[in-house]
Image (spheres, helix red, strand yellow):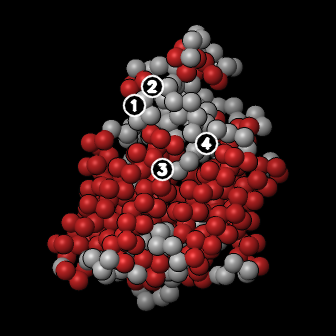
Amino acid sequence: MVGALGLASVEALLAALAGEALGAAIGAYPALSVAGLVIVAGEAVHLAGGDRTLTALVGLGPAFGPHVAFAGGVAATAYAARRGYLDTDFAYHEAKHVTAALGTRPDVLLVGAAFGLLGHVLARVSATSGIPVDPVMASIVVSGFVHRIVLGYPLIGTVRGGLLDMSPFERGERRAAVDGGTATLDRDDLSDRRYAVEPWLPHQYEWGGVAVSGLFVGLFAAFLSVRTSSPFLAFGIAAATLLFLDLEGDGRVPVTHHMALPAGLAALGVAGMGTPVALVAGGLFGLLSGVVAELGQRTLYAHADTHLDPSALGIVVTTGLLGVLSTAGLVQLDLLGALGY
C-alpha cells in the first residue's frame, strides 16, 4: 500500500514526518488502533465500489501507517523515557509504555518524526527490493532495533533465568532481588520495582492460549478475506480493538492483528482449492503467527528495556513463509501484489 507514493515523493516524506509527530503525541498503540479504524473505513469504501485511497495513504501508508505512526511512537517513547519525561505507575521500564500519550514536547515530536520518516524509507526499500515479506512490518522490526542502538538501550538485555522462561514473572520476582539487591518496590527506584522478566502481554503469553487465539482469529480472518477478497479488513478490525486495550483498566483485551493479516493472505493464496481449505490455511497461519510473536517477545522483549514489536515479527516471519510457498508453487499468491506494492 505504501507503493502509492514513491520514495522520492516530497508529499510522502512530509506526510511521514507529520503522521509520526501525531503518533508520538497520542501514543504508539493508540496510533495503531486509529490506523486500524481507518483501514476498516477504507476497505468498506472499496467494497462499496470505491478505491483504496484511504487505506493506501493513511491506514497503511505514509500519512499514518503502522511503520510511521506506531514505530515512530515506539521510538519516541524510548526517547522520552531516556530523558526522564515519563513518570507513571507502569510496572515495566517506562520505555515500554507504548500506550502512553507523549504530549507536545518538541524534542519528543522531532524524534518521533525522524523515526516516522525512517519507517517510510525502510518500507519503500523493502518493497522495491522485492523481498517477499510485508514491507510495513519489516520496517517496524528494523526500526525497533535502530532505536535501541541510537538511544543507547541494550539490544536484548540481561537474561535472568532461561531465555524463554516466564516463570520469574509468575513468581513476582523483581530484577533487583534476582541480581542480589533488595526488591523494595520503592517508587523512585525503577530497578527495584521492575519484574525480573517482563512479558509483552501479561494476560497473553501462555503457549496454549496464544495458539488457540491464533487459530480462531485466523479462521475469522480467512472467512472475511475469502468473502471480500481483502486481506486488510480483518487486520483493520483486529488493530482497531487495541483501542480497548488502551482503555481497559485490567488489561485483558488480546492483541490479535498479527494473527489476522497472515491468515487472510494464506486464505487468499489457497482460495482456489475451496473455502474449507482456505479456512484451514487461515487458522493454521493465525496460530503460527501468534506462536512466532510469542517466541519473539520472549527473546527480544521480555529481557529488554524498550518495545520491539512481537506482532510485527510474527507477520514478517509468516509472510516470508508465504513468499517461499508461493515461489515453490504451493500457494497461488503474489505476496507484494496482494499487499498493494
Tell me whether the residue at label 2 lies in contact with that at label 1, contact meaning CB atoms closer than 8 angstroms. yes
The secondary structure type at the circle numbered 3 is helix
Tell me whether the residue at label 3 lies in contact with that at label 2, contact meaning CB atoms closer than 8 angstroms. no
In the image: residue 237, left or right of residue 325: right
- The relative height of residue 2 versus residue 182 in the rendered view (above or below) is below
Quadrant assignment for the N terminus: bottom right
In the image: residue 136, left or right of residue 122: left
Q: In the rendered image, which residue does mark 4 sit on?
A: 155
- The relative height of residue 115 versus residue 176 in the rendered view (above or below) is below
Say whether residue 230 is visible.
no
Mark 3 residue crowding within 10 angstroms, few (<14) / some (14–19) / many (20+): many
Real-space CA distance between mark 3 and mark 2, rounded to the nearest whole angstrom: 20 Å
What amino acid is labelled 2 in the image?
A: Gly
| Mark positioned earlier in the residue sequence (4 or 1) | 4
The secondary structure type at the circle numbered 2 is loop
- The relative height of residue 112 versus residue 163 in the rendered view (above or below) is below
Residue found at the very far front of the displayed protein: 328
Q: In the rendered image, which residue does mark 3 sit on?
A: 310
Q: How many marks?
A: 4
Say whether residue 89 is visible.
yes
Q: In the rendered image, which residue does mark 1 sit on?
A: 165
Real-space CA distance between mark 4 and mark 1, rounded to the nearest whole angstrom: 18 Å
Mark 2 residue crowding within 10 angstroms, few (<14) / some (14–19) / many (20+): few
What amino acid is labelled 1 in the image?
A: Asp
